[in-house]
Image (cartoon, rainbow, N blue to C red):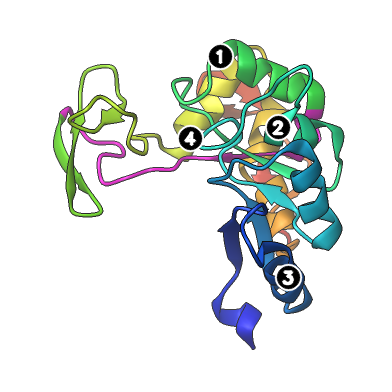
């Protein structure tokens, strides 16, 4: 019953009571994602042991990747239990790092937008949680202090961005469709089917994911 109304929760596993919350949410069928966190790699792995299965906004608002303390990204790369949510506007995460993510864990990447009201809109002022954000010609919404504040990304653009850095179009499309659907337990929402002729997608000829059934 709970899972029917609440599908996903993002939390910081290092906070008091967090692992108990992960276990309770997971037992109720709710997807738990690690994010907005200063967790170490060990704390991130402990969250996976407790039932967490996703990383929210890989590399953003979390302890970074280090060669002695791998942080959240390092634990996520090494642990196949995690799906990696990636904001693919090429501003939140640089193109070379996006390419690294796909090189390491292509079949576990879920493209996300983190979109705000500015998504798909022209430059101007928009609202995020009651606060002003400014969308400039670079396509990235920012607070008055200059901090990135959500994105103006749409999912089709995310796919095009990832294809533009050399990721196979089929892998990029799967990251926007099959992987996220499977991660939330909706395996019937997207599946790959052969098509009789190529499909044009963002300047790339490829096969397309389709609903099954």
Residue 169: x %, y % from top left: 67, 24
Residue beneath disc 4: 156
Between discs 1 and 2, the one toward the N terminus: 2
Q: Is residue 90 left or right of residue 21?
A: left
Residue beneath disc 2: 71
Q: Nearer the viewer, mark 4 or mark 1?
A: 1
Residue beneath disc 1: 95
Quarter of the image where the N terminus is located = bottom right
Q: Measure the alpha-carbon separation of dots 4 and 1.
A: 17 Å
Residue at image x 51%, y 37%?
61
> In terms of image quadrants, where is residue 150?
top left
Q: Is residue 98 visible?
A: yes
Q: Is residue 36 above or below residue 124?
A: below
Between discs 4 and 1, the one toward the N terminus: 1
Q: Secondary structure at mark 1?
A: helix
Residue beneath disc 3: 20
């Amino acid at each position: 019953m709970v899972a029917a109304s609440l599908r996903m929760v993002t939390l910081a596993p290092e906070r008091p009571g967090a692992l108990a919350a992960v276990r309770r949410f997971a037992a109720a069928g709710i997807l738990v994602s690690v994010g907005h966190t200063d967790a170490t790699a060990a704390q991130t792995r402990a969250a996976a042991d407790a039932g967490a299965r996703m990383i929210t906004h890989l590399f953003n608002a979390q302890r970074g990747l280090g060669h002695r303390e791998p942080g959240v990204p390092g634990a996520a790369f090494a642990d196949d239990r995690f799906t990696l949510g990636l904001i693919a506007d090429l501003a939140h995460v640089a193109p070379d790092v996006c390419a690294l993510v796909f090189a390491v864990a292509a079949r576990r990447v879920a493209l996300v937008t983190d979109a705000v009201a500015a998504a798909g809109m022209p430059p101007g002022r928009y609202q995020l949680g009651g606060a002003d954000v400014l969308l400039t010609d670079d396509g990235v919404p920012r607070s008055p202090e200059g901090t990135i504040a959500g994105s103006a990304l749409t999912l089709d653009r995310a796919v095009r961005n990832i294809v533009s850095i050399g990721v196979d179009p089929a892998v990029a499309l799967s990251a926007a469709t099959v992987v996220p659907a499977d991660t939330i337990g909706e395996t019937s929402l997207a599946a790959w089917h052969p098509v009789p002729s190529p499909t044009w997608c963002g300047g790339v000829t490829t096969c397309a994911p389709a609903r099954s059934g």
